[in-house]
Amino acid sequence: FPHRTFQEYLAARHLTGIEFYPDTLAEMSRTDLNRWREVALLAGAKAGRGAPAALWSLIDALCYRPPAQREDGLAESCGVLLAVQALVEADEQIANVAALGPRYGEKVDRLRDGLRYLLRRRDLPALERARGGRFLAKLGDPRPEVLTVEAMELCWVPAGAFVMGDGKERYHHEALTYDYWISHYPVTNAQFAQFVQADGYHNADYWPEAIAAKFWSKQGFKGIWDSTPRQAPHHYREPFNLTNHPVVGVSWYEALAFTRWLTVHLQQQALLPRDWQITLPSEAEWEKAARGGSDLPIGQEPVSWGKLSVVRFTGKTAANALAERQFPWGDEADPERANYDATEIAATNAVGAFAGGASPYGVEELSGNVWEWTRSI
């Protein structure tokens, strides 16, 4: 047949009628995702119309190992991705995870665990990782460090020299004389929503710059492009508004207000020392976090707020072999390490999907995904 879609439809009809349908289709789909994706989805939709149990048979076949037994093979991650897509695209009643009940809880947890793992895979194409991140938001992302400000993770940047700027603006002897911490990931929609829910847009203490610029009143924030005051970021459609995606539609003033609220909130929770402050990074702080200093610490991992004051530097360092790197990972642009035009996602992605693009300090997505504010404008 000249039309591949019709071929896929006929293949789906045939496969759903054979004796070992779920296992046969699952095996083919896991080993050649691009070839069998549409066939599996059509088969799942057909099976789901008959009875939810038939769809779950396919999902179980695609993702049959519990988390503790799942192998590290790419085929398993492809199976997880396809299983979740079949569920998400199923009838609304079947795909409503919250209404599935305890009988399916273990199965859904298995899917979540698989998605969480595949986000970090470097051998799975960026487009598929981004797809998995969207599905993870729909199933309920289990990562507290992504969904709550209280569990945010941070990376340590020690004092010292670094190369700042590029070309004629390059300064080889720039130095920051203090240590600082910077967030592991960009702030997500779920985390910024906590600020909104805490009535942050109506607290004058968080908005001194906006007040000085006459952009804030008791009714909320009204920037240059706003016709009326806002009490939340500009609204963007899916996937931009998914909980595990970085927040968008916020001005410099809103970003600063969030950091002031976060300082107060975490100090009230005894998660941040009273003499510490959260703010946007300066341009120099941002660039050092992305490029790395002349010497880099060894063995430092991202930590949560409650551990900041007790974490101690190991004392081990290594020379930064790429101290003048153009990107956090090196000198060559790479669509598998950052979400930009060449990656062809054409939207934001769930944070954590580009582990290969981490900076020398472990900070992720400093390049790609979204533009970022600094306090140096």
Image: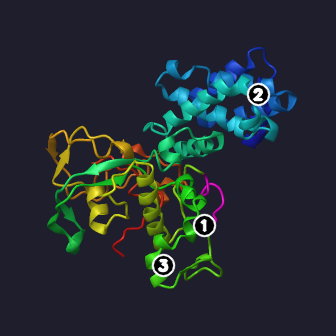
Q: Which mark is residue 141?
A: none
Q: Which one is in front, 121 or 161?
A: 161
Q: Residues within 10 Å of mark 1 (few under 14, many from 20)?
A: some
Residue where numbered disc 3 is placed: 210
Instruction: Tell me which amino acid carries mark 3.
Output: Ala
Residue, far right: 50
Q: Is residue 12 left or right of residue 83?
A: right
| Mark in front: 2 vs 3 | 3
Q: Residue 30: x, y in percent? A: 59, 27
Mark 3 and mark 1: Cα distance apart in space: 15 Å
Task: Give the SS element for disc 1.
Answer: loop
Q: How many numbered circles are shown?
A: 3
Task: Give the SS element for disc 3.
Answer: helix
Residue 214 visible: yes
Q: Earlier in the sequence, mark 2 or mark 1?
A: 2
Q: Residue at x 51, y 74 (%)?
A: 204
Q: Residue at x 71, y 40 (%)?
A: 88
Are the residues tagged 2 and 1 within 8 Å (C-beta)? Answer: no
Q: Main secondary structure of the magenta part?
A: loop
Q: Which mark is residue 55?
A: 2
Q: Residue at x 56, y 55 (%)?
A: 194
Q: Is residue 181 left or right of residue 115?
A: left
Magenta region includes residue 56: no
Residue where numbered disc 1 is placed: 232
Q: Is residue 249 above or below residue 145?
A: below
Quadrant that contains the N terminus: top right
Query: Where are the magenta residues, as a range?
Result: 234-242
Q: Earlier in the sequence, mark 3 or mark 1?
A: 3
- The picture quadrant where one finds residue 13 is top right
Instruction: Tell me which amino acid carries mark 2.
Output: Leu
